[in-house]
Image: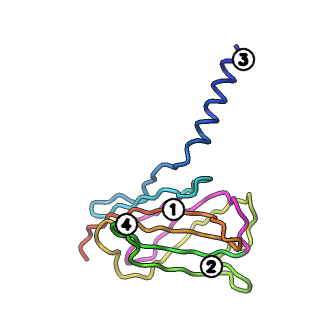
């Protein structure tokens, strides 16, 4: 009786390890604006939610984001790419944590610690570009290792 249970348990573990894609999460789904994300880090997923979708483009809005760190973040860099029809049309990068240069409260967190942020975010743009496109976001640390990674699918048909 124990052998079938052990075999089933092993098969479940093998399936979990073989599956490297995370589900697509819905961040926002309004009449004319949809935003989805999927973690592109095969090791871990993360949680993200936005309080009020229509405020994203023009206002400060509140988010909640959480993950367990797979790597320490003494230094942290963000790289964003806007991809339309498979081609990168816009790139942005910035240092978020560095020697004598820490913009975030979780700079210096260690591997295995919980990273949780709840608070306001302002994109600083007047409007979200219309159409369907992908925003690829990667956070890397001082060792150039991915700390978090997600591909955001945006479908925006808002009239500004």
Task: Residue under label 2, please give it.
Answer: 96
- Give the mark count: 4
Discs 4/3, front: 4
- Nearest to N terminus: mark 1 or mark 2: 2
Say if mark 3 contacts mark 1, CB within 8 Å: no
Label drawn at residue 118: none
| Numbered disc 4: secondary structure | loop
- Badge 2 element: strand
- Give the label, 1 or 2, closer to the camera: 1
Residue placed under numbered mark 3 in the picture? 2
Disc 4 + disc 3, Cβ < 8 Å: no
Quadrant for the C terminus, please. Answer: bottom left
Q: CA distance from mark 1 to mark 2?
A: 17 Å
State how far apart marks 3 and 1 are (Cα). 41 Å
- Residue drawn at x 36%, y 82% as measured from the top left: 126
Left or right of 126 in this view: 51: right
**Within the magenta stretch, is there residue 49?**
yes
Where does label 4 land, which residue? 86
Local secondary structure at mark 3: helix
Measured in 3D between alpha carbons, the distance from the residue under mark 4 to the one under mark 1, in whole angstroms, is 16 Å
**Magenta segment boundaries in residue numbering:** 48-74
Position of residue 82 relative to residue 99, above or below, is above
Looking at the image, do the residues carrying marks 4 and 1 touch, with CB atoms under 8 Å apart? no
Rendered position, 154 above or below 43: below
Residue 109 horizontal/vertical position (percent): 73, 68
Please tell me whether residue 17 is drawn above or below residue 62 in the rendered image. Answer: above
Q: Residue at x 26, y 67 (%)?
A: 157
Residue at image coords 62%, 36%? 14
Q: Position of residue 132 (x, y in %)?
A: 31, 65
Residue that label 1 marks = 150
Q: Residues under labels 2 and 3: Cα distance?
A: 51 Å
């Amino acid at each position: 009786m124990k052998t079938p249970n052990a075999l089933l348990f092993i098969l479940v573990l093998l399936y979990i390890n073989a599956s490297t894609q995370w589900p697509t999460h819905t961040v926002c789904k309004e009449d004319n604006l949809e935003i989805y994300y999927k973690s592109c880090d095969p090791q871990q997923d993360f949680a993200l939610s936005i309080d009020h979708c229509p405020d994203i483009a023009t206002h400060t809005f509140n988010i909640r984001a959480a993950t367990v760190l797979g790597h320490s973040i003494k230094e942290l860099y963000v790289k964003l790419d806007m991809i339309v029809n498979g081609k990168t049309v816009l790139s942005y990068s910035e240092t978020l944590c560095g020697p004598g240069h820490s913009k975030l409260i979780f700079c210096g967190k260690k591997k295995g610690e919980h990273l949780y942020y709840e608070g306001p975010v302002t994109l600083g743009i007047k409007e979200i570009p219309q159409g369907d496109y992908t925003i690829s976001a990667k956070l890397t640390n001082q060792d150039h290792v991915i700390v978090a990674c997600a591909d955001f699918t945006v479908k925006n048909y808002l009239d500004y």
